Amino acid sequence: PGQYPYTRGAHPSMYRGRLWTIRQYAGFGTAQETNRRFKYLLDQGSKGLSVAFDLPTQIGYDSDDPIASGEVGRVGVAIDTLDDLEMLFEGIPLDEISTSMTINATAPILLAMYIATAQRQGVDPSKLTGTIQNDILKEYIARGTYRFPPQPALRLTRDIFTYASQHLPKFNTISISGYHMREAGATAAQEIGLTLANAICYIEQALHAGLKIDEFAPRLTFFFASHSDLFEEVAKFRAARRLYAKLMTQRFGAKDPRSSVLRFHTQTGGVTLTAQQPDNNVVRVAYQALAAVLGGTQSLHTNAYDEALALPSEAASRVALNTQHILAHETGVTNTVDPLGGSYFIEQLTDALEADAEAIIKQCEERGGAVNAIEAGWPQSLIEQSAYELGQRVESGERLVVGVNEFAREETETMEIFRPSEQTASEQVSRLEASRAKRNDDEVKAALAELDTFAQGEENIMPSLLKAVHALASMGEMCRVLRDVFGEYDDGRA
């Protein structure tokens, strides 16, 4: 463990030296509501925050835009201006708490807001720790919250790499995500292979921008799912580490050992949760969390048992959080650095997954790399086929799902589930109007004009976004400027 190619773990002492970060994903309604949930999670022992944004925020629309109707604050927190992000972290010192933000198409805008919020708190941005997902390629493959075409979207990703290498030395500039592809139906091998194929594209973009591999690679991170096949998941994480280490040294010539270490966050499998007999989800999540820890994750989110029905309730969030505490402090799994290392079954399964993932990377490259493959629909069709085959196995009973196609019972109990306030949208729109009323319109116009100039040119776009954010330009206003320059992406599949 801790030695190339890192199959057995990213660090020599693993959890004997330091536990994984317990990071619970949360966000709903307004910034004020989510701030209260964040403080609750921190009080309950969470060591890092993970922000869920609503769909309008994810694709760059203001809360009062007609297209946002019915979606404000529904699947995450609504963020329109810097005022909202400042409220989201009110009373939470950003130099002490690590924050992960699940944001992609609008990642540079949210990062600019986060930097500006730190500055308002009096925190030097160089002290910020955390991760911005900033993985736009998987949006085209599996998730769908894209706004701009692939090439300008990759330019925004590259600008974050460059800016952060100079100003945010402790902040992870991307979380290259296999999670959403796995949730969409990818197999374990496809999750590794497609994720690393995307990683190759991002690395090549950064190198093209003039960055040296060892300047930015140590801040690259990954995000994987953990599903219920315990040993396959453990082997998947081991295979991913080994394959990545080989890619970084043999293909990209990385010299700094930190550049070759695949560090990753894990989330238990949302798609594995069932609306039927939701109490069973507590057990599923516990086993999936065990797989992530036995596989050597650096950070973990455990899903709540009611997430197949609605956003997590406070009670369900507490159970999910305590699942990690019990795993860390009562089971003894942290006492041994790599408890499954040397198992013939695990080693053989690791080898097989690595070979399958490597073949997928090769197939992607034969199609011209990640962007060309995405534009041709190849990874999308690969995942769709796997999802279809899994669905057929469940429907036929070949794949047993407790409480769904076997051991089912008639539901008699009702569960109280969490619903965001019906007033969320009107409250958020009022807050947006208040931000607009107090700002200097001339300053906003000048900042947006500068953003337009930067977008049309080759300069890094982050400084102009920071200026616009400080002027209280809204998410929708900034994205309209970028849309007018970059255009909007249509995959032709609607």
Image (tube, grey):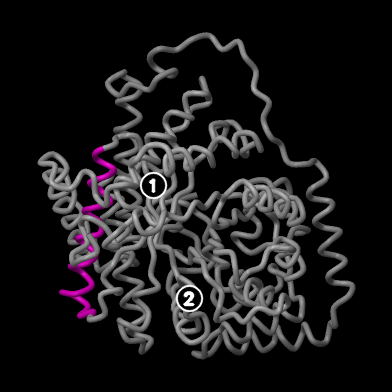
Dominant SS of magenta comes to helix
Question: Is 430 situated above or below 43?
Answer: below
In x, y percent, where is residue 387?
34, 38
Query: N-terminal of the two: label 2 or label 1?
Result: 2
The type of residue carrying mark 2 is Lys
Decide which of 376, 57 is in the foreground and name it.
Answer: 57
The secondary element bearing badge 1 is classed as strand
Q: Mark 2 = which residue?
A: 170
Residue occupying image coordinates x 61% and y 38%: 312
| x and y percentages locating residue 194 in the rendered image | 30, 57
For the point 36% across and 78% down, which residue is it?
205
* Stretch in magenta: 231-254
Name the residue nearer the viewer: 310 or 8: 8
Q: Give, as a three-letter code, the residue at label 1.
A: Ala
Q: Position of residue 68 (x, y in %)?
A: 70, 53
Q: Mark 2 packing: few (<14 Cα in 10 Å), some, or many (20+)?
A: some
Residue that numbered label 1 is attached to: 225
Q: Is residue 129 left or right of residue 66?
A: left
